[in-house]
Amino acid sequence: MIRHVGTILALLIGYSTQADAHSGGLNKQGCHAGSKPYHCHSATKKAVKDPSSPSTLNGTVTHVRDGDTIEVNGVAVRLSALDCPENGTRQGDKATKVAKQFKGSLARCELTGAKTYDRLVGYCSVGGSDFGSYMMQNSACKVWPKYDVWNRY
């Protein structure tokens, strides 16, 4: 009996150690969104990191959730300091429509290191222009000073 308890403990410790070495769930694209170093297990939708900055995500805008959340190569990014009306409202639907014109464009997101829900948080340039500034100038989105952690706006 004692020998079996020792075996069970050894197995539990082994499983616990493996989980700690590679913790964090995967999103639907197979990526550890929020773990460091950021990486994906899916070869088809792997995010491209800028080697000069481990907190930069480069890729294509693959989806637009709403006016202040885009997906870059399937990785959700909540735009820091941007406050847009919610989908389902007239202004929110308009903001989403404005943002959707960038689907397929190249994006560069400087990640702040924060995470909210299933999204990384960052400041993004899309098609070479600051996405937050564009959305503030062309929709009902506005700056949310509390979350402008790098004082960009």
Image (cartoon, rainbow, N blue to C red):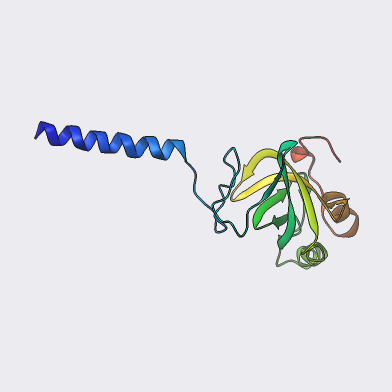
Residue 104's place in the image compared with 152, above or below, is below
* Residue sitting at the far left: 1
User: Does residue 69 show up?
Assistant: yes
Residue 65 screen position, x and y as percent: 69, 61
Q: Quadrant of residue 88?
A: bottom right
- Left or right of 32 in this view: 13: left
- Relative height, residue 19 to residue 91 (above, below): above
Q: Position of residue 40 (x, y in %)?
A: 57, 50
Residue 80 image point, x, y percent: 75, 44
Q: Residue at point 70% right, 50% down?
A: 78
Compare residues 91 and 42 and report the one nearer the observer.
42
The C terminus appears in which quarter of the rendering?
top right
* Residue located at (78% from left, 65% from top): 100
Q: Quadrant of the N terminus?
A: top left
The number of numbered badges drawn on the structure is 0
Q: Residue at x 87, y 50 (%)?
A: 133
Q: Nearer the viewer, residue 57 or 150?
A: 57
Look at the image and tell me whether residue 86 can be seen.
Answer: no
* Vertical position of residue 4 compared to residue 90: above or below: above
User: Could you tell whether 35 is left or right of 106 in the image?
Assistant: left
Residue 50: image quadrant is top right
The percent position of residue 122, horizontal first and vertical second, equals 73, 44
Taking the spot 11% from the left edge, 31% from the top edge, the residue there is: 2
